[in-house]
Every structure is written in C-alpha cells, then in structure tokens.
Image (spheres, helix red, strand yellow):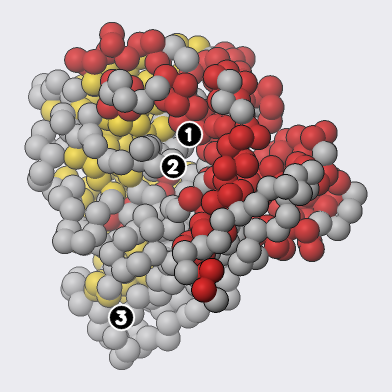
Amino acid sequence: MPFTPRTHAPRRLKAALLASAVTVCLVAASAPPAPLGVGDRLFPHLGNPGYDVASYDLALAYSGANDKPLAAVTTIDAWMTEDLDRVNLDFARGKVESVEIDGEPAAYAAAGEDLVITPGKPLSAGQRTRIVVRHSSDPMAGKGREGGWVRTADGLAMANQADAAHLVFPCNDHPSDKAMFTFRVTAPEGYTAVANGLPVDIERAAAATTWTYRTHHPMATELAQISIGRSAVVHRTGPRGLPIRDVVPTAHRERLEPWLAKTPGQIAWMERRIGPYPFETYGVLMADASTGFELETQTLSLFETELFTDPAFPAWYVDSIMVHELAHQWFGNSVTPRDWSDLWLNEGHATWYEALYADEKADRPLEARMKAAYRASDRWRAAGGPPAEPKASEAGNRLGIFRPNVYDGAALVLYALRQEIGRPAFERLERVWVTRHKDATAGTADFVRLAGKISGRDLTGFLQGWLYGEKTPPMPGHPDWTSDAPAGAAGK
C-alpha cells in the first residue's frame, strides 16, 4: 500500500461452563469476557489464540444504500489448537443476532473489539469446529475508527489494512492466520459484485443477483476485497493464459482503458524478475472514492479512480504505483508477514520493484532514488523507528505504521544487501524467497537466514544495523553517501 502525493505463546481463558445450553446474548461465566490477542508488538489485541482458521464463508446482502448496514452471515471452519472454554473472534461495528457452534446455539458477548463466544461444551485441541455468526455489517465509520468498508460514489469497496477486516466481519484478524475464502454477495438489479478469487456461481432473481467467488489460495483477512457498484467488469488475458479482470465505474470505462491495458505487460515484467504470478487471477479495482492510498487486496488491487484521471500525477508515476501493488501479490500476499513488525518485507519489496520499473521504463534512476533515501534515512528512523522495528501508531491513527521507513527506507535495505552480496545472489534470493514461502507466512529472521544461505556467508551482523539500527550504516560501494541528522540532533 503506497501513499499517493510466530508463532506466539497461546493463552487460554479458563471460564465456568454454562449451566445449560440456552440461547442468550450474555456469557454466563465466572470470569468476565476479555479481549485477547496473539501478542503482536504493534497491535497487541489483534488476532486470537487457540485455533487456526481453515476457511471463511461470508454471505452479504446489499440493499442499494451504502449508508445502511448489510445483513450478513459469516461461517468459520477452524481447527482448535488447544482446549478452549471460550472462542474469541475479532469483530466490531456490527450487531450480532445469533451464534452457533457446530449447529448448537452459543452464548456470546462483546469485549472491546472482540466477540467472545461460549459454546455449550468445551472445545478440544485437534477438533474441527464450525462457527456461524449472523450479524450486520455497518459501512458507516465509527467515531475515530475508520477502515473496513469504503463508501464509493456508487456503492462499496473494502480497505482492511492493517486491522480493519473485523470492522466488516467476525474473523481472526491477524496476517499469521491465513485461510481460504468464499464470498456470496447479493445486490439489487443494476449493481455488480466482485470479490477476491474467481467466480463460481451467479444466481439471478427478479430484483437481485447473488454472485459467489472463491479463492484458490489462502489469504490474510486484511487482504479481503468486495466491490459492489454500478461497475463494468473488463476481461483480458495475461501471461501464460492468466485471466485478468478489472472492475471500473461503468461511466469511466473507455477513459480508463489505456491504463487497464498495461497490466499484462506489467505482470510479464515482474515474472521475468521473480517467477510466475502466484494466484489464479489478477486485476485492478478502480473505485470512485478518495482514500489517500492504494491497496494490494489479493488478486484485485484497490485504486482510486482519480489516480488515473488527475493530470497532476505523471504517467510514469502512475505506472510505477500499479507495479507497486502488483509486486505485493508476491510480497505480502503470497508471502505474508508473520507479524506487523515484518511490514518492511511487504512495502520494501513493493517499493523496490516500483523503483526498478521506473528506472527501466521511465529513466528515473534507481541509484538517485536510493541516494535520496539514504540522505533522509536517519530522519526516518528517528521519526518512525528502524525498518524492521517500526514504532507503534499513535492512538486513533491505524495507518500510522505506514511511514517512509518501511517504504523507501526498507527498499534502501534491499539496495544495501544487493551492493553487499552482488546482483546475481540478490536476484536468486528474491526468487527463492517467494517460492519457498508461497501461500505461507514468513518473518524478518527467515529472510536474514535465507540471504545468508544464498550468499554463502553469515549476514546477521551486516543486516542487524540496516534493519534495527538507530542510525543508517555506511552504504557498501558508496562511502561518500551521507545521511542528514534528525531534527535536534545537532545540539546533542
């Protein structure tokens, strides 16, 4: 997502069982329900321990008014990884009507941004469990809590990064728990619904249509995407027969076609560098909304329409941003960060290929960009932390972790690594990284180990300073590069 101008130790809640299986909304337990988390340094209450989600089935009914709640049913199939008396899901900004676990009514209560569910009997480690939550999904942003649904001029789209999928549907909202997804979206006549993955069914009725989409690869919740609008879906073919579908406002279809036509060539460009595209389809969703960012939602990247229609954005810049989101399909989507502190692996790589593309296609020299980043790097580190240890967001600013230190600051780390181990080893590292960790999660330590293995030397010490240092280390091959001191440092 560019701006445009562990595994963790499990925790088990010990609660008294319900005296009888009754359908109630309050948890009858000796200990009050409490929000949990998987211990993410940047989002302590995000995600939940004790289970591993295998799949989500999300059914939504859209009324035609994007300021009204959608009726929804979320079905979660999960494996219990430990014995649980309660199951916590991340969920906020919706009204829960009922919860079932394995076909039986379950009690539930809200605790912070968690939905705490108490089954009629404890769940055992190794057990496969189905949770069905009937709820509403509210597209209206709460006070000081944006994210999730994006209201467009003609409907809705999603922007869930980093911690907002649970503002749309109940889930285990942490990238470490990837799962398969099925989406069933019902909308009135005149609207089109598109979601991640490929279409598997369309059911038309007198006044509404239901579209069903299914992913072929596991996905993190923050990458989920649903578009509902008066949209045109444009189909074309990419490299090796890859189906490409773009979703654009019908009124802008012809005007946007020159940009849409670029995607197959951009995919081919990326494949020449890091290998086959990792998913079943790709495309761009051009939303008539002002978000201030673009987003790499899996197989269907979200863009603001104005990025392509505002003449203030040079063509080379728009091209490179398209490649940035495309690169994320490998870096961040297929290979997903284990923790949000590993964000640099997503944004640093996407920025790296964005910069390489601009270097090759638009004569915007990579070295000049990296030199400018080096000059600013100490200031970025002081303001936002080092690339692999970013500072937490300020309260109320969920996008605060997306600072320059994890974009160009992290791309600078990759440039330094290429300078240190040479281009052939670096390019092999990139290909092996996306192959070895395809459809999985990986972290900074995994990248450091693989870099050492590919280069045939221990790079722990070298990368320690680049990834975690307060000051930017000397750039290999460029001893003359200097970094500006942070504000106030001169007097110390």
Q: Secondary structure at mark 3?
A: loop
Disc 2: which residue: 1
- Mark 2 belongs to which amino acid? Met
Left or right, residue 64 beside residue 246: left
The quadrant of the image that shows the N terminus is top left
Q: Earlier in the sequence, mark 2 or mark 3?
A: 2
Crowd class of label 3 (few under 14; some 14 to 19; many from 20; radius 10 Å): many
Residue 56 in view: yes
Considering every residue shown, the one lying at the far right of the view is 456
> How much space separates mark 1 and mark 3, taking CA atoms?
39 Å
The amino acid at mark 3 is: Pro
- Determine whether label 2 and label 1 are within 8 Å by CB: yes
Residue 340, percent from left and from top: 51, 59
Tell me the SS state at disc 1: helix
Q: Residues within 10 Å of mark 1 (few under 14, many from 20)?
A: many
Q: Is residue 75 visible?
A: no
Q: Distance from label 2 to label 1 (Cα)? A: 7 Å
- Residue drawn at the location 43% of the way across and 82% of the way down: 13
Instruction: State the mark number for residue 325.
Output: 1
Q: Residue at x 45, y 26 (%)?
A: 317
Q: Nearer the viewer, mark 1 or mark 3?
A: 1
Quick check: 455 above or below 131? above
Whether the residues at callouts 1 and 3 have beta carbons within 8 Å, the answer is no
Q: CA distance from mark 2 to mark 3?
A: 35 Å
For the point 57% across and 32% down, the residue is: 355
Instruction: Tell me the kind of residue under disc 1.
Output: Glu
Q: Is residue 421 above or below residue 301?
A: below
**Percent position of residue 477, x then y:** 79, 43
The reply, left or right, for residue 10 in relation to residue 31 is: right
